[in-house]
Image (spheres, grey):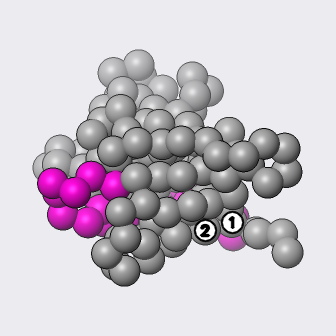
Amino acid sequence: MPLTDPIGDLITRMRNAQHGRRTDCRAPWSRLKQAICDLLKQHGYLESVVVDGDGVGKELVVSFRQDREPLLLKRISTPGGRKYVGSEEIRMHLHGNSLAVISTSSGLLTSKQARAKNVGGEILCTVS
């Protein structure tokens, strides 16, 4: 069954896995989902991101860090209501203690990176 919001599905799977005290979760693979997870891993929110399988059955295995509180993930832009911001409209989330993942013309960036490069785009989600 096709999904209408694959990014929302990934975020929900991650939230549910952490709520169930699991150390990892699995989700169908896509380049965008892998880029989001790699960005979160790069900033220390995730332990590891591994691609399992090949072809149509490819899955993304996300391992959570055990030394921190569960992530607070929130989907901002949805298929029915996109949220775009210009470079001057990007603001700090939770006084800099969280990050927003923004899809820009330069690829996926955090809110801090997008401000530094002076580019705007679609706010996909926030993580804290």
- Per the rendered image, the range of residues in magenta is 64-86
Image quadrant in which the C terminus is located? bottom left
Please tell me which residue lies in front, 94 or 31. Answer: 31
Q: Residue visible at 41% across and 19% down? A: 117
Q: Where is residue 65 in the image (x, y as percent from the top left)?
A: 27, 52
Of marks 2 and 1, the one in the foreground: 2
The image shows residue 50 at horizontal and vertical percentages of 53, 42
Asked if residue 80 lies in the magenta stretch, the reply is: yes
Q: Which amino acid does the dot numbered 1 rest on?
A: Asp
Q: Do the residues labelled 2 and 1 touch (CB within 8 Å)?
A: yes
> Which quadrant is home to the N terminus?
bottom right
Q: Residue at x 60, y 50 (%)?
A: 60
Query: Mark 1, residues whose alpha carbon is within 10 Å: few (<14), some, or many (≥20)?
Result: few
Residue 76 is tagged as none
Dot 1 falls on a residue whose secondary structure is: loop
Q: Say what secondary structure mark 2 lies in.
A: helix
- Magenta stretch prevailing secondary structure: loop
In this picture, residue 41 sits left or right of residue 31: left
Q: Where is residue 28 in the image (x, y as percent from the top left)?
A: 69, 57
Examine the rendered structure and indicate whether residue 22 appears above or below residue 49: below
Looking at the image, which residue is at 15% across and 54% down? 67
At label 2, which amino acid type do we have? Answer: Asp
Image location of residue 46, percent across then percent down:
34, 47
Q: Mark 2 points at which residue?
A: 9
Is residue 44 in sight in this rendering? yes
**In this view, 11 is above or below 37:** below
Q: Please give the residue where the numbered disc 1 appears in the rendered image.
A: 5
